[in-house]
Image: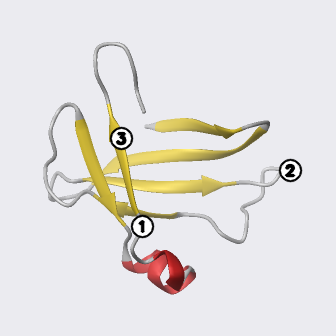
């Protein structure tokens, strides 16, 4: 699943959710330049720490981000959903 992620007028980001062999959801940040080429800092994220629950899922930073941006190794992204919102 690809989810456009806007920061103000910057529409260069997309969250990409996939499921791995163990049934866990993986989150990656796909950052692009206006011409569609990949940003230098892209394809980072994390894999769900468990099978999650319907309203919330956590994605702790993975080894890729530890190597790409060591200062972000402690990052955790999360997605929450309810009947009226997706955050």
In the figure, residue 56 lies in which quadrant?
Answer: top left
> Tag 2's secondary structure?
loop
Q: Locate the C terminus and report the quarter of the image it occupies.
A: top left
**Figure check: 5 above or below 70:** above
> Tag 3's secondary structure?
strand
Q: Which residue, given by chain and number where applicable, does mark 1 sit on?
A: 75
Q: Which residue, given by chain and number where applicable, does mark 3 sit on?
A: 79
Mark 1 vs 2: CB contact within 8 A: no
**What is the C-alpha distance between the residues marked 3 and 1?**
14 Å
In the figure, residue 5 lies in which quadrant?
Answer: top right
Q: Which residue, given by chain and number where applicable, does mark 2 sit on?
A: 35
Q: Locate the N terminus and report the quarter of the image it occupies.
A: top left
**What is the C-alpha distance between the residues marked 1 and 2?**
29 Å
* Residue at (49, 75) in percent of width and height: 72
* Residue at (86, 50) in percent of width and height: 35
Which mark is nearer the camera, 1 or 2? 1
Is residue 26 found left or right of 70 in the rendered image?
left
**Figure check: 36 above or below 76:** above
């Amino acid at each position: 699943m690809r989810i456009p992620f806007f920061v103000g007028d910057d529409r260069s980001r997309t969250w990409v959710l996939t499921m791995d062999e163990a049934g866990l959801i993986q989150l990656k940040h796909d950052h692009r330049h206006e011409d569609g080429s990949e940003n230098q800092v892209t394809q980072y994220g994390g894999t769900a720490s468990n099978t999650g629950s319907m309203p919330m899922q956590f994605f702790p930073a993975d080894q890729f981000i530890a190597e790409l941006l060591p200062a972000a190794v402690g990052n955790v992204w999360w997605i929450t959903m309810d009947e009226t919102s997706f955050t």
